[in-house]
Amino acid sequence: MPTEIKRSACPYDCPDTCGLIVEVENGKAVKVSGDPEHPFTRGTLCPKMNHYERTVHSPLRLTQPLLRTGLRGSGQFQPISWQEAIQRIAARWKEVISKYGAESILPYSYAGTMGLVQRNSGHPFFYRLGASRLDRTICAPAKEAGWKAVMGNTAAPHPDEVAFSDLVILWGINAVATNIHFIHSVREAKKKGAAVWLIDTYETPTAAIVDRAFIVHPGSDGALALGLMNLLVRENLLDYEFLRTSVQGFEELKKEILPNYSLQKVISLTGIPGETLKFMARTFGKVGAPFIRVGAGLSRYGNGAMNVRSIVCLAALVGAHRKKGGGAFVGTFTAGAFPMAEILREDFMAGETRIVNMNQLGNALNHLDKPPIQSLYVYHSNPASITPDQNAVIKGLAREDLFTVVHERFMTDTARYADIVLPSTSSLEHSDLYRAYGSYCIQWARPAIPPIGQSKSNWEVFSLLAAAMGFPEPFFHQRAEDLIQYVLSLPNNLRKGIDEEDFAAGKAVELIIPAEAKTQFKTPSGKIEILNPAEPHPLPCYLPPHGGKESFRLMTAPSVFALNSSFRERADLRQKEKAMLLKMNPADAQAKGLKDGEGVVAFNELGEVSFILQVTPKVPSGVVVAEGVWWLEHCPGSRAVNALTSQRLTDRGAGSTLYDNTVDVRREN
Ligand SMILES: Nc1nc2c(c(=O)[nH]1)N[C@H]1C(S)=C(S)[C@@H](COP(=O)(O)OP(=O)(O)OC[C@H]3O[C@@H](n4cnc5c(=O)[nH]c(N)nc54)[C@H](O)[C@@H]3O)O[C@H]1N2
Ligand SMILES: Nc1nc2c(c(=O)[nH]1)N[C@H]1C(S)=C(S)[C@@H](COP(=O)(O)OP(=O)(O)OC[C@H]3O[C@@H](n4cnc5c(=O)[nH]c(N)nc54)[C@H](O)[C@@H]3O)O[C@H]1N2
Ligand code: SF4
Ligand SMILES: [Mo]
């Protein structure tokens, strides 16, 4: 049989949303590479996706429905038919609903697939069921809240515009791991003479590609931005014309806030020396078009939204937005490209139901009452690994009376606790619509290969469950393809002018956003709102992070070779990380008498986690770094990093505070 070439999209939660070229032989994906015609992918993939066929055809893929036979968490199951699995779920749900009401059922899903139809296919079903709703805020709602407080719904610049910048600031983003295709245009800028800076809490792999890396105290970026603004004022490096015509509240900021951010105060809050702060402010104020790429890292703190808000204001003081190559970029807002209401179908909800914050799953499973949660349905997420306060989550999952269903590709930490496990297709096996949040690309992917084993897509499973629960609405009884066709048949402004033929053929196409959109400020005042009267703090100011009483700040940063807990099935990728490491500064290790390569335990009031110590000057004193989220079966001990992260939330957006925790460290006995 000849090799067939199919197009697909990367389904993972990554700003790049790459286009894939899939080579198929006998219904098997034999090679996956980057689509050379994709405007952002430009023919290359990241190390994780280079061998996506190894994930898709992994011998560890779940291929049939399973019923638990052993203790919860033991991973002992027996195969059952789809019919039996669906019948058992429906029967148990009917029983639970009659005793406790439908709000005793909680869906849990997040980012296993970012395709709009498969990702959201549980929404209509659970609205119709009357289940508790999940507030899906684990990722970066504080980043969005910080941006919106200043910029409203203003469009982000095109990411490739960065090529025209003369100062690129990668602020709280480990782009080499999480936004690798953005670096292409950063390199272009560098070739033309731009300086590239990194502002992070340690020297991440991205430090290797920048001119200067500035290391700040965790959670202090808001203070840094305010301090730089104060220096810009003092050194008269402002764009007065822009401030007058396009910014609301600069005078108030200058009078009421900035004088509180003396050099001394900012040095002590951020840990950056005074001369360095002055260098940063002068450079920033004197270049023509600074481009700030804001990552999610600094938003996952008790003061996360305010950190982002202050950084976005900083760009306004020098009029960065009005210059080609200048501005602030937190992400593209491409949601309007498809009518989401037709996919989510909130109208199926008969009345307002309870909302549970996904970061607080541990509390919800263990403490919620009226009604208590009696059943958890998990799809394309791995809460036992990725949710803060792992001990609380696992304690909840271990509850004898909790009926848990997990729809998964692999036997994850969460699936081990399920009563019923359902096998899921991978993105190469189902249809979907994709939209990027780090570029303006959209794409329509059809299946490249048939489903592996008896696996079914999220959409198909909710169709079966809807039938078993007796939902008559035709919506539930169509195919995902039918919904996609319907959604695409509706008129849409944002998709106007795209190459329809390419899009229908499965190629990625770019939404057409005029270059001037970034200066058409979509805020109530029509200006950039440094002063926003609708915010609890109308002007930006420094808010302290949550922190903790232990001596080390714990960074739980992303790994280059995994994506949250995804790709952990791949031994080839795990080996590249060598082990589950805790990185520590040499002076701290010496003070504690700890040696490189030995087993250590990081602990706080929430839990204890074993790591292998890596002593490295790339981490500053007072900080320890644990990259990546590991499956328990690969951990040196019995818990992974999220046993050390808390359920506390961000200042705005009710987001996770995954970076805002402290630990102490001791030698493993
Ligand atoms: N390889 C890989 N790619 C991924 C992921 C992954 O796990 N691995 N995850 C995906 C997901 S779900 C998301 S949301 C995106 C996230 O992607 P981004 O938004 O780019 O965020 P990260 O790269 O996670 O950035 C976290 C960085 O912030 C730093 N940081 C932490 N606290 C602070 C602080 O107080 N100040 C400053 N200046 N920096 C701080 C961390 O050290 C880390 O380098 O990446 C996606 N892509
Ligand atoms: N310590 C720490 N914790 C973190 C983070 C961190 O940086 N550090 N990052 C946080 C962030 S930003 C995020 S977004 C979350 C992400 O957390 P999750 O949304 O849980 O993402 P993953 O860990 O990638 O797990 C997704 C699961 O979905 C499965 N899956 C993939 N495709 C499908 C499908 O089509 N159907 C079904 N049913 N299953 C599918 C995959 O096999 C995988 O096990 O993690 C958060 N947790
Ligand atoms: S860079 Fe991101 S979007 Fe591209 S292949 Fe890798 S994970 Fe997927
Ligand atoms: Mo995320």
Image (cartoon, rainbow, N blue to C red):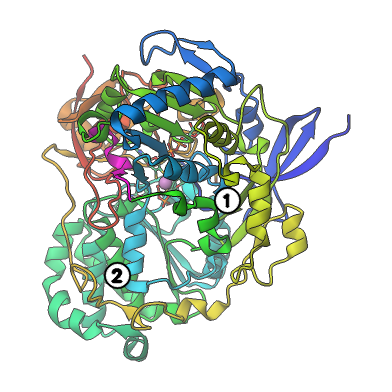
Give the side of residue 472 with respect to residue 108, left or right: right
**Observer-nearest of 372 and 62:** 372
In the image, what residue type sits under mark 1? Thr
Q: Position of residue 479 (x, y in %)?
A: 66, 42
Name the quadrant containing residue 495: bottom right
Secondary structure under the numbered disc 1 in the rendered image: loop
Q: Quadrant of the N terminus?
A: top right
Name the quadrant containing residue 299: bottom left
Q: Which residue is mark 2?
A: 279
Q: Earlier in the sequence, mark 2 or mark 1?
A: 1
**Observer-nearest of 418 and 518:** 418
Is residue 550 in the magenta section?
no
Residue name at image x 63 percent, y 28 percent: 54
Q: Position of residue 17 (x, y in %)?
A: 57, 51
CA–CA distance between discs 2 and 1?
36 Å
Q: Relative to 205, does residue 193 appear above or below in the rendering?
A: below
Q: Which residue is mark 1?
A: 17
Q: Quadrant of the C terminus?
A: top left
Give the side of residue 655 with respect to residue 70, left or right: left
Neighbourhood count class around disc 2 (C-alpha, 10 Å): few under 14, some 14–19, many 20 upward: few
Residue stretch in magenta: 352-363
Q: Position of residue 24 (x, y in %)?
A: 78, 34
Q: Quadrant of ligand 2?
A: top left
